[in-house]
Amino acid sequence: MAELVQRRVEDHIPELQQLERVGLLTAKEARTVIKKVTALEYKLKRRTVDKEDYISYIQYEINFLELLNKRRRRIGYSFKKEEIEFVIVHRINELFGRAINKWKEDLQLWMSQVAFCKKWNCKLQLSRIFSSLLAVHPDKPALWIMAAKWEFEDKLSTESARHLFLRALRFHPDSAKLYQEYFRMELMNVEKQRKEKEDLDKAKMDIEKDLFSDEILNGELVRVVYKTAVQKIKGAKFHLSLLSIAEMFDFTKHLQKDILADLQTLYADDPLTWDFLARQALSAKVLPSAEYTSKQTKAQDLARKEEQCSLVYEKALGSLQTESMWELYVAFCLERYKRQTNSKELKQQRQDRLLSALQKAHDSDLLPQARYHDWISLLMELGQGDVASQVLVKATDRFPGSVDMWKMRLETLVSLKAENLENVFDKAMTLVKMQDSLPLWILMVDWSEEERNEEAIDSLYQKLVLNPVATRTMKVKYLDWSYRKHGYKRARKVFMSLKENRPFSEDFFQKMIDIEKDQEMSKMVNLREYYERALREFGATQPDLWLSYIKEELSHVEGKPENCGAIHWRAMKMLQGADVEDFVTKYTLIQSGHL
């Protein structure tokens, strides 16, 4: 073992001697490097080697390489790179190789070596790495795409990139992402070859007959890739993704028309097809700016386009009365409504169209649940609270188990100061699952604090602190309400009545601590009781609670700093793992006065 380590260490000597001769390293620094490398090599020869040992060695070599680069720039010396940097880069790649041989499944190691090779332009090495990587991890399409992109963009090898994509598709014939990237690559290749041919034509240079393939220049190969892709991957979404890629290239007009024609033929009943066709009107060619005689003319042109979009959506809804189709139409209307405009007429048209679409979808029982929030917010903003209330009556009938719908309905009734709120609440509680009811109880308690007498509120809180779903939250709110309405003595009485009533939340104890500290003459004996009870419940997982207790003993007038040692000892016994490190770090900062 020692002989092998010695041989590896001796491999460092030639470049270290070169570094000394050219003034990039001192003799003392060279000796330090030898000692460090020896220690790192011995770590790799232990009976049980950790991955971190290899990573530390690699990181040391990379840091050394970066240091040399900085020193070269500082003294302006750029020679002897083959004898120095190239040797170190080769050694780092060897270290990566040794580590990867032991932990082939660790993708992060592979990616680290790929990043290193890209930075140092190790093209030959990188080709081998990708080949090995794909042999070990052929099940990850993203790696095939990465390798193909590197071949095409960095090595400028279209054939190698195409070969990789074709191999990848044999492993993953149903991968939409692979087909998308292959399609994009072939389009980029056509663009590159067309540009090269154009430049040669301009220079009036003789072009070899076989230098440029007509099949590629005319986009026939791209069309083959497209046809294969849409046969394998079904769905309008994928079809549209290919169309969006084709639109990035100005020579694909005919291909775009064919893709669009296929989309309309194959997926005529897909809402995404209609959504795309409707939005096409917005991207129609606009009038030249000189023809806009006023801002009003521009707004009128935009209003006309949006109306055309709306007509397409309505035509689609004539044959596709589905929730997803209404969702796309409402999303379009909402998107246009939110766009800024100085035209009052255009804004009003957008508002009317949005309200109309929402109402029609609602009447058809096809408005998606998530869209009710947008609708109700708009109605309340427009001062149409009564309309919002009527809408939500039908919405809660349609989604009787939705806590969000009932919460929205109750919030609307609260804002309208409706008289039947308690009846609606009672109905909601019979329909919503018990485990989902907390938001409704919170809303009811907040409303009660504003509208009901104190006796009724207190009775409600006493009922809710026994509710298994609401108990944690309600204990905190009960404590807070008691302090706000009746002061410290009542709050402490509530705390004492609940102190043994599990389950607790950390906020419950923290609220009582804050109330105690809010007093003009807070008592440390009370604070200790609150902290001790909190630590009994949460001490094993909350290092900050221990630290707050320690700081209280140090800063309070009645505190006993001598207790901090015992608190620290208890914390170290109860906390586990990363919490211990966090506690020790912050405790040290407290001792040094930095926290």
Image (cartoon, helix red, strand yellow):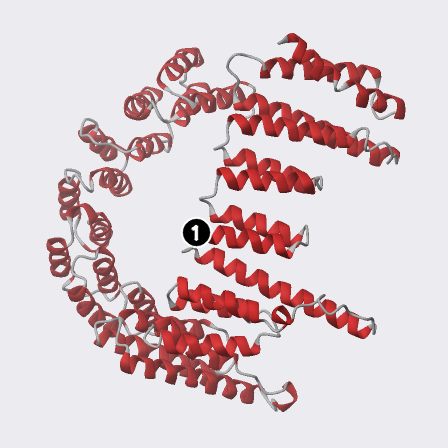
Quadrant assignment, res 174: bottom left
Query: Can residue 551 be seen by looking at this rendering?
Result: yes
Task: Look at 81% across and 20% down and name the residue there.
Answer: 14
Secondary-structure class at tag 1 = loop
Q: Position of residue 92 (x, y in %)?
A: 67, 29
Residue 118: percent from left, percent from top: 66, 42
Q: Residue tagged by mark 1?
A: 172
Q: How many marks?
A: 1
Q: Quadrant of residue 93?
A: top right
| Above or below: residue 567 compared with residue 430 | above
Amino acid bearing label 1: His
Identify whether 305 is placed above or below 362: below
The front one of 589 and 453 is 589
Residue in the image at 25% along x and 57% along y: 404
Q: Residues within 10 Å of mark 1 (few under 14, many from 20)?
A: some
- How far across and down, in percent of the image, does residue 367 sit? 27, 70
- Left or right of residue 132, residue 583 in this image: left
Q: Is residue 595 left or right of residue 336?
A: right
The residue positioned 49% from the left and 33% from the top of the image is 106
The reply to whether residue 341 is visible in this rendering is no
Residue 30, compared with residue 230, is above or below; it is above
Name the residue nearer the viewer: 310 or 425.
310
Image spot of residue 155 (x, y percent): 68, 50
Which residue appears farthest toward the top when viewing the image?
2
Tell me the quadrant of the picture where the N terminus can be found. top right
Q: Could you tell whether 135 is left or right of 129 in the image?
A: left
In the image, farthest residue toward the front: 209
Residue occupying image coordinates x 37% and y 66%: 235
